[in-house]
């Protein structure tokens, strides 16, 4: 089964960059990448963090995972894609589209 994910930077704040993500299946959400570009957290479109789940790219592990496996998986994929592009480009990207299996 092939799926796709699109992440678009929708806001830059003092606390970091907010990305909206959407899967081909219609699942959506938002992620805040902190200002030092190392921690991702689920958030509102305004950048207000939701829950306690986070991904620290230096550790490479989801901490305080959300109990919903679908949300946890989507968050992990979106955060990973954003961090991979940041490594590749040397900066946070404006938009990313990825296909995965």
Image (cartoon, grey):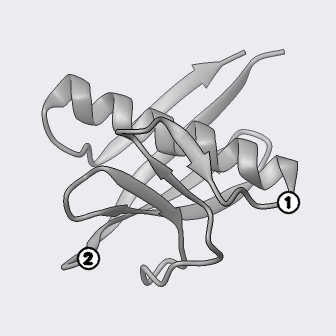
Image height of 21 relative to 13, above or below: above
Q: Residues within 10 Å of mark 2 (few under 14, many from 20)?
A: some
The residue under label 1 is: 67
Give the image quarter of residue 93.
Answer: top left
Instruction: Give percent across and percent down for residue 98.
Output: 52, 26
Q: How many marks?
A: 2
Give the image quarter of residue 13.
Answer: bottom left
Give the secondary structure at mark 1. loop
The residue drawn where x is 25% and y is 36% is 86
The residue drawn where x is 61% and y is 42% is 76
As drawn, the label of residue 41 is none
Lateral position of residue 79 relative to residue 38, left or right: right
Q: Residues within 10 Å of mark 1 (few under 14, many from 20)?
A: few
Residue, far left: 90
Image height of 64 relative to 14, above or below: above
Of the numbered discs 2 and 1, the one sitting upstream in the chain is: 2
Lateral position of residue 80 relative to residue 4, left or right: left
Instruction: Give percent across and percent down for residue 85.
Output: 31, 31
Q: Nearer the viewer, residue 43 or 19?
A: 43
As drawn, the label of residue 15 is 2
Q: Nearer the viewer, residue 6 or 17?
A: 17
Give the secondary structure at mark 2. loop
Lateral position of residue 5 relative to residue 1, left or right: left
The residue drawn where x is 63% and y is 50% is 75
Instruction: Give percent across and percent down for residue 28.
Output: 68, 58
Mark in the foreground, 2 or 1:
1
* Image quadrant in which the C terminus is located: top right
* Image quadrant in which the N terminus is located: top right
Lateral position of residue 21 relative to residue 87, left or right: right
Residues under numbered marks 2 and 1 in contact, where contact means CB atoms less than 8 Å apart:
no
Q: CA distance from mark 2 to mark 1?
A: 26 Å
């Amino acid at each position: 089964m092939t799926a796709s994910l699109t992440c678009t930077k929708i806001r830059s704040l003092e606390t970091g960059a907010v990305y909206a993500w959407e899967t081909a299946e219609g699942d959506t959400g938002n992620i805040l990448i902190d200002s030092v570009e190392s921690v991702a957290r689920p958030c509102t479109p305004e950048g207000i963090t939701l829950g306690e789940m986070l991904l620290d790219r230096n550790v490479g592990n989801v901490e305080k995972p959300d109990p919903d496996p679908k949300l946890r998986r989507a968050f992990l994929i979106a955060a990973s894609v954003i961090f991979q592009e940041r490594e590749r480009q040397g900066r946070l990207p404006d938009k990313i589209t990825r296909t995965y299996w």
